[in-house]
Amino acid sequence: MANHNAVQILNLNRPADPAKDRPARGEAMILHCTPRLMIAALRGGAGKTLVATGLAAVMSRSLGMRVVAFKKGPDYIDAGWLSHAASSPCYNLDSYMMSAGRLLGSFVNRAQGADVAIIEGNRGLYDGLDADGTCSSAELAKLLKAPVILVLDATKVTRTAAAMVLGCQHLDTQVRVAGVILNRVAGARHERVLVESVQKVCNVPVLGALPKDVGIPFPERHMGLVPVYEHVCLQGTLDLLAESMRRHVNVEALLGIAKSAEPLGRPTAVDDGSRRRGRFRPRVRIGVIQDRVFQFYYPENLEALQEAGAELVFIDSMHTPTLPDVDALYVGGGFPEMHLSQLADNETLRASVRQAVEDGLPVYAECGGLMYLSRGVRRGESEYPMVGVLPFYITMGKKPQGHGYTLVDVVRDTPFFQAGTELRGHEFHYSRVVDVNGPLEWAFRIKKGFGVLEGRDGVCYKNVLATYTHIHAMGCAVWAPGLVEAAWQYRVRRDMLSSSKGEASRPLVGQSSA
């Protein structure tokens, strides 16, 4: 498949503005021209993920294109589906956690060389943090100059669909609504009225109509779709999605719209600190517990650790017998509550993690990782032992205990952050801390969000930092270098201790070792 990227570069920290960004005489202008689409909707649950995943699957699998997928907002589950459909990592774009320059830079660098970039929005097109739609999908579409394809849930509606599309077109005329895909269409007559209404009133093409019962198993759970790690027929589902897109959607027309996207100015390279490791310093080994239980990792976070000087060692919490030889440990989020028996049964791994923590191993744990480090998790009438280094238990609630963006101040030095640092992140957890046995040391003061207890988050114990806040490396430049540095310091201390023990046991010159 031909590559449609232009071979010019414009060094900017913002999108290109022809009136302001004309190059000086003799200066080369470099523009980024990857074809791209944003898949958006009027609300959550309208079918964005179905369409975005289906398009990534048909373009990648059936058309042989190189597809790079992006997910707007804090999300691991939809991103997992998009990643498998595109056969490449799905990256996140979040204008709350990232500056505009870093967000644009991440998109340009990761989309470079792709035949098409597919960006899935979140919630409704204009839904953001406030009445102005701050951090909305619409604002992201404008920043990336991405044509918007509006997925419209057609349940029990006909001509009113045109009014909804028209509203999206006129609320902000800088947002280019370039096409509509109808979802949950009841039949041929329903489709005909919808298409005629939208195209006549809005002068925008209807590029597809998915039937009410599309026949694709897309099961949901309390946080959205069931993650790809747990889906019983992943490849079959993706094949069905690709076939459904071919049958019901004008894929060629969508590609034509993608190619019509305006060029983007390329941002100036920003040194985020992740590459600042000693020139001759060997790579540290950072363990990452990643499996069916702990699935929630932004690929950018793992890449940032590698760029900062880490070799990643992946660990299965249910089957790895003991902690490998590592210099630090990263435990992300996931669904521990769905695998409590298996976690509890792997007693040898839990014991080795506990001993490593007592020996000073740096551990960074987010959400599910915090649960794993607790004394145990209670669900219903049952209690399941966990690692046991944090002095509390976890219980599961029926409703979210924390949900949304977070803003925290670091109030004490940790192995990973200095006091005075401000962190932007997000949380979504049904679990909460109970039965605290002893004082807790806190690293974070919550300015926005829920956290662990009473406006606090970031529980500290020795070199452990466990938090309900998920952070993104593109919005927190100090995190990856901090974790790598903590790992290096631990290795140095461990090697010195090992060396001193060796010297102490070595016999003096002329002294018998017998």
Image (cartoon, helix red, strand yellow):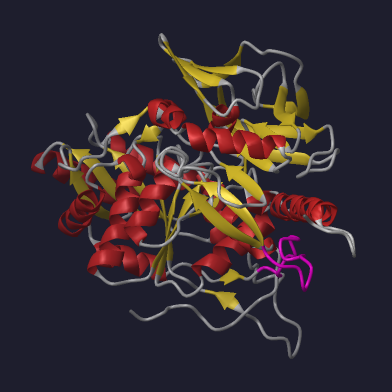
Which residue is at the front of the view, 29 or 411?
Answer: 411
**Among the 4 quarters of the image, the one containing residue 186:** top left
Please give the name of the residue rendered at 70% of the width and 43% of the height, measured from the top-left corner.
362
Image location of residue 270, percent across then percent down: 73, 65
The correct choice, above or below, for 360 with respect to 146 in the image is above
Question: Does residue 397 show up magenta in the picture?
Answer: no
The quarter in which the C terminus is drawn is: bottom right
Q: Nearer the viewer, residue 231 or 3?
A: 231
Instruction: Provide residue 259's location: percent of width, then percent of height.
Output: 40, 71
Q: Residue at x 30, y 49 (%)?
A: 51
Residue nearer the viewer, 352 or 461: 352
Compared across the picture, whether 171 is left or right of 11 comes to left
- Asked whether 276 falls inside the magenta stretch, the response is yes
User: Is residue 130 at least partly visible in the picture?
Assistant: no
Q: Quadrant of residue 46?
A: top left
Per the rendered image, the range of residues in magenta is 267-283
Which residue occupies the foreground of this view, 62 or 46?
62
- Outermost residue on the bottom side: it is 26
Taking the view exactly as shown, the residue that stands out farthest to the right is 509
- Quadrant placement of the N terminus: bottom left
